[in-house]
Amino acid sequence: MQVSVEVLSGVERRLTIVVPSEEFEDRVAGKLLDLKNNVRLPGFRPGKVPLKEVRRRFGSAVRADAADEAMRASYEEAVLQESLMPVSVPRLEAVKAEPGVDLEFTASFEVLPEVELVDLAAVEVQRPEAEITDADVDSMLENLREQQRTWHSVERAATEGDRVQVDFEGRLDGEAFDGGSGENAQLVLGARQMGEDFDNAVTGLEAGAATSFEAAFADDHPNETLRGRTVRFDATVKLVEEPLLPELDEAFFESMGVKEGGLPAFREEVTGNMRREMEDRIQRLVVTQVMDELNRLHSVQLPPALVDREIQARKEAMLNQFAPQQGRRRMDPSSLPDELFRDQVEKEVAVGLVTRQIRNAHDLELDDEAVRVEVERLAESYAEPEAVARSIYQDEGYLNRIEERVAENQVVAFILDQAKVNVLKSTYQDIVTGQALPPPEDESPAATSSEQDGGAGVTGDGSSA
């Protein structure tokens, strides 16, 4: 077999492959013989159809099938021979396939690009550090109590922190509007679920009291109808409840998974979970910066097929996450525009190619011991860590994700050994809420809701909250 490689572009290759006529004709003859032994034709007994008749009737189709089979097998052999790494399905085109001549065809496809690594000393990141103080732990204990609060009816005026049950009706320019009314709505005063003006109007009212008031809505309100508008509300308070927080006693500790040792043991458990969460957040902050730096410092020509494949995978993942109830039609992935995912996918594919090159260039093999430590670390927060660890090892998908994270951490650690790392003194609260680092110049300083909801208490099974 003869193989020549042509570079069509940075990531496109075309192989011209020549298979000797004798080898190809042997393949054709073999397929004709198999067909002769199995074909059924009127007037002939099974297996007794003359080979000449089989060739006359089916020769063209058999030759085309043999050519397709030979091209695919020879392509796979040629890719290995030339040490190429295709990332797209090859386009195979026959050039010569006539009897008596060598089979010649081309295979066009995309390959992984060559990545020229920069000096990793050019990478610069900030690593926040903080001590967990007694005040931080006290605040977390109060958060845990808040999560377990119960509500009790009171016969007094509502104050901030109370929960009220109200019926309300709103009018915009004198007209009712969708979403502007409700019955038995529960609002925690101070949480501004309906806005500051609504809370202020209801505060001070007892059960049975009614009020009319105007409430102004912000220009960025989620409901486009209400943005920058003022609504006239009529509201009736039906119930006022005050919160009751559980005591920090043995019953509370046991409900959180700590059965012995009282308050000192509970504080130690909570502190350990807080420390693990803070370390995880620090690691994610550092990893994100390293990946951003790799993307900034390297110019990578991306194979379109690789990007498109990842975009389709993102679409499928999104639709699976929001899968409809049984019996309803699933949304067609093609209805989601590729551009919704393209920028993020292109960045992640580029960084993935860079980190792959770093692993290959420096022989960074997966550390099995680090995988074991990570599995045990994840399992130790649960009431039965050994059973949890066994279940992780039995879940191939979950274990693969852990291995990918460990491999990523290995690359990050290797880079950090050479990079410039600036230690930034911070606080536990700023780290877990995503406020430890100044935001990029083109982003708002506000953290996302998921970042602001951070907490590291313990749940009933002893896991991180």
Image (spheres, grey):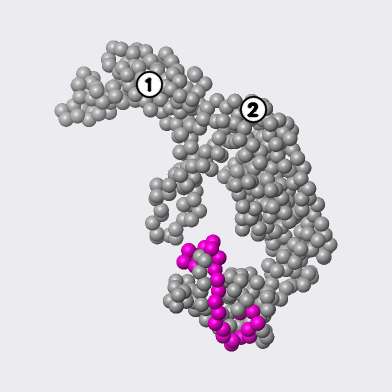
Task: Give the vertical position of 458 relative to 82 (above or below).
Answer: below
Q: Amino acid at mark 1?
A: Thr
Let me know if residue 60 is in the magenta part. Answer: no
Q: Which residues are magenta?
A: 202-226
Quadrant in the rendering for residue 163: bottom right
Q: Secondary structure at mark 2?
A: loop
Q: Position of residue 14 (x, y in %)?
A: 42, 22
Q: Position of residue 130 (x, y in %)?
A: 78, 50
In the image shown, does 244 or 371 lie closer to the viewer?
244
Task: Give the vertical position of 366 relative to 258 (above or below).
Answer: above
- At x 68% / y 55%, what residue is drawn? 433
Q: Which quadrant is the C terminus positioned in? A: bottom right
Read off the residue under disc 2: 118
- At x 75% / y 62%, what residue is drawn? 140
Residue 27 is tagged as: none
Q: Position of residue 184 (x, y in %)?
A: 54, 79
Q: Is residue 30 visible?
A: no
Tell me: 282 left or right of 7: right
Task: Give the vertical position of 54 relative to 283 (above or below).
Answer: above
